[in-house]
Every structure is written in structure tokens, then in C-alpha cells.
Amino acid sequence: MRDSKLGRWRVLGLVLTAPLWGCAAEDGDGQDSERERIEKGFTLSPVSLNLEGKDRDLVGLGSYIVNAQAACNDCHTNPPFAEGGNPFLGQPEKINSDHFLAGGMSFGPGIVSPNITPDASGNPAGVDFTEFESLMRTGKEEDGGILQVMPWPIYKNMSDRELRAIYEYLRAIPHAEPAP
């Protein structure tokens, strides 16, 4: 009898914790809460966003990917955290929004993260989407060099929509310059 009671509690535990796994947030197509990721993306962006002429959903999803999954800030913002906001020092996290994604992080001789904020034409790092997608999928730069440090061998596996979302988010953030 004890085993059957335990079994019922396990089943009840699974039923009660299922929403924590995202099961309850799935829509009819089995997609788990893309809407939630989009909205969360807007709360995660450490900078104001320019949505004019941009796909709002892609911007939000891109922010979620950039700020909650891909850790772009760790390499493309120098330093990644504002004064007094480094969580690795036990401080409450505060992203360096003044230089957000403006590059300038050194990884050794000749390897410095690029500025991936929009240029004067509105293109992140001055590249159009086709060039961005190629960089993310192949790691090859125009001059034939291969991106070093950049985890493109992992990012190349992202879906077309995810890469488009990242690009759209990068178009929506303000231009910034690297820290001196």
C-alpha cells in the first residue's frame, strides 16, 4: 500500500511541477512559449531600443538570445559590467550599458572583439544580414580569416529565425563606442 501512495505523490508532483518545465506554456503547435521569451527579452535589454521600422517580435526574441543565452556581452562589451556591478565579485549585476556590445575586449595579440552596434547606416558592425548570417554560419571574414574566440561553431547551428532575431536586436540597440 505504501508504494501506491508514493506513486500517487510522484504523479501529483509531476503534475504540479510540469508548468516549471514549460509544459503548460506550450501552444497548440508544441512551441514552448516563444511569446514569453520575446517579452522577457524586452526586460533583459540593458539599453533602450529603437523599434521604428523593425519587427518587434524579432527584436524581443533577439534580445532574449543575446542577453539570456548567447552571452554576447561577455566578449563584446569592455568591461562587461559597470563599476560595482560585477556578479563574479558578489556584486548585484549591472551591465555596462554605456559601452554595450561596442567591442574592445582583448583576447591576446591581434584579437580584439569588434563593435557590433549599428553603424551610421543602421547595420550591426556595418554588415548586412547576408554578411552577418555568413559570419555566424562559417566563421569566415571577407579577407578569408576565421573568427577566433567567437563561438561560431556553436552559433552556426541556430535556426534562420534565431539568427534573424539576433540581427534585428542588434539593429535596434543604440550605437556605442568602445571604452577607452
Image (cartoon, helix red, strand yellow):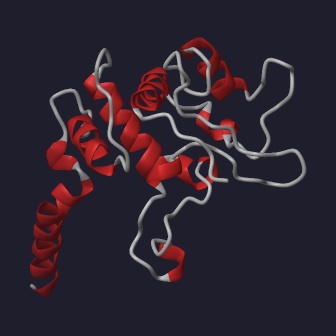
Q: Is residue 171 left or right of residue 60?
A: right
Q: Position of residue 54 (x, y in %)?
A: 32, 19
Q: Is residue 46 above or below residue 49?
A: below
* Farthest residue, direction front: 180
- Which residue is at a point 47% across and 82% down the rendered structure image? 90
Tell me which corner region of the image, top left, top right, bottom left or bottom right, holds residue 151: top right
Q: Residue at x 27, y 36 (%)?
A: 34
- Which of the 4 image quadrants contains residue 168? top left
In this view of the protein, which residue sits in the foreground, 63 or 17? Answer: 63
| Relative depth, front residue between 141 and 163 | 141
Q: How many marks?
A: 0
Residue 6 picture quarter: bottom left
- In the rendered image, the residue lying farthest to the bottom is 2
Q: Is residue 71 visible?
A: no
Picture coordinates of residue 91 (x, y %)?
44, 79
The answer to whether 111 appears left or right of 62 in the picture is right
Quarter in which the N terminus is drawn:
bottom left
Say whether residue 31 is visible: yes
> Which residue does the image show at 12% across and 87% down from the upper left?
2
Q: Position of residue 119 (x, y in %)?
A: 56, 24
Residue ID at (64%, 28%): 136
Along the line of sight, the residue nearer the viewer: 34 or 46? 46
Q: Position of residue 133 (x, y in %)?
A: 60, 20
